[in-house]
Amino acid sequence: MLTLAILIPMLGALALVVSPRLGHQAARAVAVGASVVSFALLLIVWIGIDTAPSAPDFQFLAEVPWIPSLGIAWRVGVDGMSLALSLMSGVLFISSISWPMENPERPVSYYAWFLFLESVSLGLFLVLDLLLFYVFFDLSLVGMFFLIGRWGHDGAQRAALKFFIYTLAGSLAILLAIIGLVLSVDPITFDMRSLIAAQPLAGHDLRGGLILLGFMLGFAIKTPLFPVHTWLPPAHVKAPGPVSAILAGVLLKMGTYGMIRIPLQMMRESFAAYALPIALFALASILWGAIVALGQTNLKRRIAYTSVNHMGYTVLGIAAAGALLSGAEKAQSLALTGAVVEMVAHGLITGALFLIAGGIWARSQTYELDAFGGLAKVAPKLTVAAVIAAFASLGLPGLAGFVAEVQIFVGTFAVFPVIAAIGLLGILITAALFLRLLQQVFFGDLASARAGFPDLSRRESVVLSVLLALVVVIGIYPRWLLDLIGSTTRAIVGG
């Protein structure tokens, strides 16, 4: 089931590659169809997964030997965390593929690259082999590089190159760390389950610290954390809206997912020793991302910097969960659950925000906030969608962002109370920057150049309605998501 969920988008991409003469509508139909089938398979897995405390850590396992002498195999399986991220990714890929193209040239190639990227993204979340994790991690760079460089705005090639170089450097650090980790096990294996059980670097302070540094550097670039975040804003500004939605909603989560799955789970002692510095970098990202976002005059750049801020919340929850603190397991489990919920919520919310930004650019050819004003008078549906997404991003109760952030901060207060207290300032600044954004773009006097600004089309309305409905459902009734994720986070913290 999981293997098919990974392979079907890749087969869809290959079908498009061998059918270059397909029209735009037919190519999109193939891409949407492949994504929907893959998502349906994940839904079947969700229905069948066991979230009871006595359930096995990983379920729906499948394994086919590949290089037995190195312990490498095609291994797939899910726990609550990876399944939640896979389901969120599936929703976001369907939404982004369905969204109208901003640059209608070469539609067959455009949708083929989207399906390729979906396949490797799901592969990263679902495989249980460390080498395959690295392969999918690197392949995601390729798909995003071409989507930004070929279909982005003026200057997109330079932004795509900066994205690729930065994140490739991070992936090379991860590769070195993987080699160091695997060589610590006898016999050698890349099986994630075996590495989690073995804890091979326990008691190796210097060696464990260096390997942890390699992992954290690579994942910090991907996440991204301050100060290795500078590739993100130009990549977002130059990318089309749907591509930005996937970059923020899915690819950034590969960094934080990797932090949990590898250093936190496989190197508990080393991670605990450096949990405080990791929390401090998370705090810097929270404050820096919010303050810099507040000063942006470009809509896309403002949203991009809020991703630095929100991913800082996620890493703060991960750091709190990994700290060595006796008697705080419940609080640490709460912080980690909040971190994973933040990943899901941020994917849906920021994905919607970037689609909205892409729709605004398609209608006006600009992201400058000063070029707008009063859009609520001519585009009420777009305004409602933007208001819901903005309030969800600033953490309004009743929406998904609040569910995540309240768990992160409640859990972190038990571990790093001073850091958590300072981090709350980020929420205040985020509220200010989003309220200011709404005021500049949607309220006040209507700019004369926007008198004929079109409202959302039917397709755009449906896509945003699905994403924002999930944001509201998680905010009002989060138990279904918390049960799924909590089954994993309790095992990680308690294990």
Image: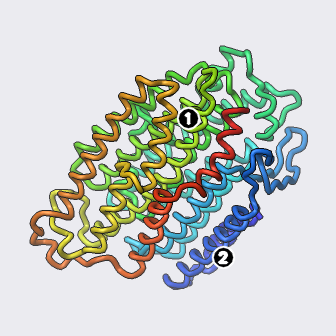
In the drawing, what numbered circle is on residue 15?
2
Mark whose residue sits in front, 1 or 2: 1
Can residue 234 be seen in this snapshot? Answer: no
Q: Is residue 220 above or below residue 210?
A: below
Label 1 with label 2: CB-CB less than 8 Å: no
Relative image position of residue 355 (x, y in whole percent): 39, 65
Which residue: 86% across, 40% down? Answer: 71
| Amino acid at the residue labelled 2 | Ala
The CA span between labels 1 and 2 is 40 Å
Which residue: 38% across, 49% down? Answer: 395
Q: Nearer the viewer, residue 481 or 137?
A: 481
Q: Nearer the viewer, residue 460 or 430?
A: 430
| Amino acid at the residue labelled 1 | Ile
Can residue 141 be seen in this snapshot? Answer: yes
Secondary structure state at the residue bearing disc 1: helix
- Lateral position of residue 472 relative to residue 187, left or right: left
Which residue matches tag 1? 318
Relative image position of residue 192 (x, y in whole percent): 76, 40
- Numbered disc total: 2
